[in-house]
Structure formats: C-alpha cells, structure tokens
Image (cartoon, rainbow, N blue to C red):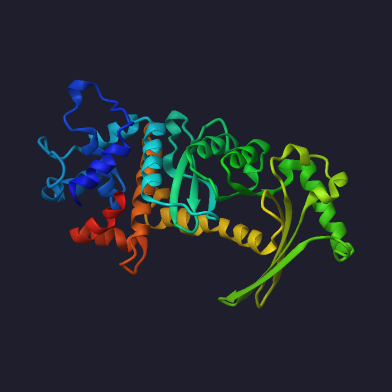
Amino acid sequence: MQATKVATIAEHFSGVQDPRVERTKEHPLVNIIVIAICGVICGADTWVDIEHFGQAKVDWLAQFLELENGIPAHDTFGRVFARLDPEEFQAGFVSWIQAVSKITAGEIVAIDGKQLRRSHDGRLGKKAIYMVSAWAVGNQLVLGQRKVDEKSNEITAIPKLLELLALAGCIVTIDAMGCQTDIAAEIVAQDADYVLALKGNQGRLHEDVAEMFAYFEKIDFAGVEHDYHRSVNGGHGRIEIRECWTFDPHQWADHFRTLQHWSQLRTVVMVVAQRQTDVQVTRETRFYISSLESDARQLLQAIRSHWGIENSLHWVLDIAFREDDSRIRTDHAPENMAVLRHIALNLLKQEQSAKCGIHAKRLKCAWDEDYLMKVLQGAG
C-alpha cells in the first residue's frame, strides 16, 4: 500500500475527533485507525489480535506510517475505539464509500438490521446492540450503518441512516418495520424509489391491499388493469415458484383509506411464494407498496434481491468475521468495530482476482503482503 492510500484514508476520517487528552497521544489517531483497518482485513477480530498483527507487520507498516513510538498496545486500541464518536466514524466511512464507488441508476439498496449478539453486558444492564445497514446489492457494498438506540427500534434509526446516503436513482427496499410514511417521504426526497414490505403495523393499508387482491383473485383479475410475472427456480431437491401481481391503487382510490399519506405511492404488490419438496408444499403470501410503476418483473426482482443482504452481508459477518462471537462491549467500541468490519468486507468483496471466500481472502491478506496491497487499492 502506498502512502497516498493512507493519505486518502486520513482525509475521509479527518472529521473524527481524537478523544484523548494531549498528553496521552503517544500514537497518532491515523495510525490507530489504519492499523485497525489492516488488522481486521487480515483476520484480526479483537484488539489483542490487532496489536499482534501490528507487531508482526511493523516493518511493512513503517513504509507508510510514522511509527516513532512503535505499535499501540491492545488497551490503546480498545480505549480509543470505545471513545471515538461513532457518528463521526460512520460519517468518515460514508465519505470514503461515496468517493471510491459509483452507485448506478436502478441499483437496489437493501436496508436491514442485525443484532451483535454478544455485545451485551449483563453486569451493567447493557443490552446487545442492533445495527441497521444499507447494502448495495449489485455492487456488493455496505453503504452505511447506524446503531439502533437501546430504548428505540429500527423506525428511528432508518431515517438517520437514509440522511447519510446518496440514493438518487436507487431502489430502496426495507422490510415491514420500515414501512412508515416518513421513511417513504425521505426516500422520495432523495430522488430514489422505494419497495416496502407491508404487514399489520400499517393496519388500514394492509387490510385494504389484502382485501383488494382477494377480490381480484376471486374474479380472476377480469377487467382489472394489472401486471403479472412468474419465476420458477429449482435445486437441492426443491422447486420454488414465485408469482407477482401489481396494480395502481389510485385507479381504485375509493377502496383505500390512507393513500394520501404515502409519498409517490404508485403500485401495490402481492407475491405468492410456493416451495415444493418431496415431502411438503408450503405457500406464503406477502404484500408490498412501491413508488415504482406497475412492473411485476422489476418489482419481483427487487423483492427477491432484498434478501441478499442476509446471505451476502449478515451471514458473511457471522461466518467470516465471527461477529456474533465478538465480546467487544465497552462504550462505543462494538459499533465502531462493526464499521471496521464493514470497511474490511467492502475491500475484500471488491478484490476479484482471488477465487475464494471472504474468510480465505482474510487469511491470504495476512500471508501475502502483495495481495494485501491489492486489496487496499480499493481504499482510494
């Protein structure tokens, strides 16, 4: 990694204030951040691991960092990241992502939450933290994240996350928790579109949509202007059939009680998913609302893409980064470590020459400094 790459990282995280008093600043903040990023990329999952990484790679790190006082101790990493303002650190992350990636029109951005299970501290009455992340499905990038306040839920965290992001031209997908009028309005205000899962938390709208689709099914959609798409996928002893119907609710406005509250709502959606195996057949019906036009193929694709965040982000964080096993708990350290994992994941995802999984790429970075440099090219 060249010095210019470190300068780029330093530039985007320059808004992060050093929480230490002057007399304790034995190591520059940029050193602590850069060593932590490199350490997590190379397989470090704790502050002790990061210190050991730094000690093992001190000569390599000295090529682009001023290491007059050597490598910080693990206690230093722990104290600094526990006290770093997480909003400032996340803003630096978002600034970096927006500088090094280009989100194209039509990109699907899935927003979903994940609990860091072992971040709780029973002695202090501290619950496990919950992080809401924005995942660019096509680019395979974390675009940003926000911690859910301990006494709140995703409804308050999602708008704050949306405010950080540049979403113009994107399609934002959120599960039923995020199906709120102010969230829809915020997405539209950013010149983006939304596809929001609809459940009982929006009682009247959910009831109206379910009743209209039930009626249309009864009459086999005769005389109803609508769109329809069907997909069939098979493998591993099962067949999955998904059917999608869409229509413009404004053509039936008299049958809907709350349309006027939803910014740019153009389409309501019903998806029926059927899974067949040798022993059983299951069937599930789900409803959605969207600011997109009534295009069943496009909407079904967006809905299916949303669940990619589970496999491509949450599952990888658990398996390749052992996030659910992490016992980092002090103050802001858990959410700041979550940001470090997201930085590492983004860089590892973007490097395509090694045909292996994220865990193997982390090991390869630790073993091969040339490959680590290649991965870090995505830093600027």
Locate residue 2 relative to residue 14 in the image: left or right: left
Between 168 and 335, the one nearer to me in the picture:
168
User: Which residue is pictured at 31% across the width and 28% down the height?
Assistant: 17
User: In the rendered view, would you say 144 is above or below 351?
Assistant: above
In this rendering, the count of numbered labels is 0
Vertical placement of 273 versus 198: above or below? below
Q: Quadrant of residue 235?
A: bottom right
Residue pictured at 29% horizontal, 35% vertical: 78
Query: Residue 303 placed where, x, y %?
Result: 62, 57
Q: Where is residue 152 drawn, in percent x and y?
A: 57, 32
Residue 326 in view here: no
Horizontal and vertical percent position of residue 229: 70, 67
Q: Residue drawn at (64%, 41%), measured in percent from left and top?
A: 184
| 359 lies left or right of 133 | left
The residue drawn where x is 12% and y is 47% is: 63
**Is residue 234 at least partly visible in the picture?**
yes
Say which of 307 and 192 sits in front: 192
Residue 98 at x, y percent in the picture: 41, 45
Going by the image, does 69 lie left or right of 116? Answer: left
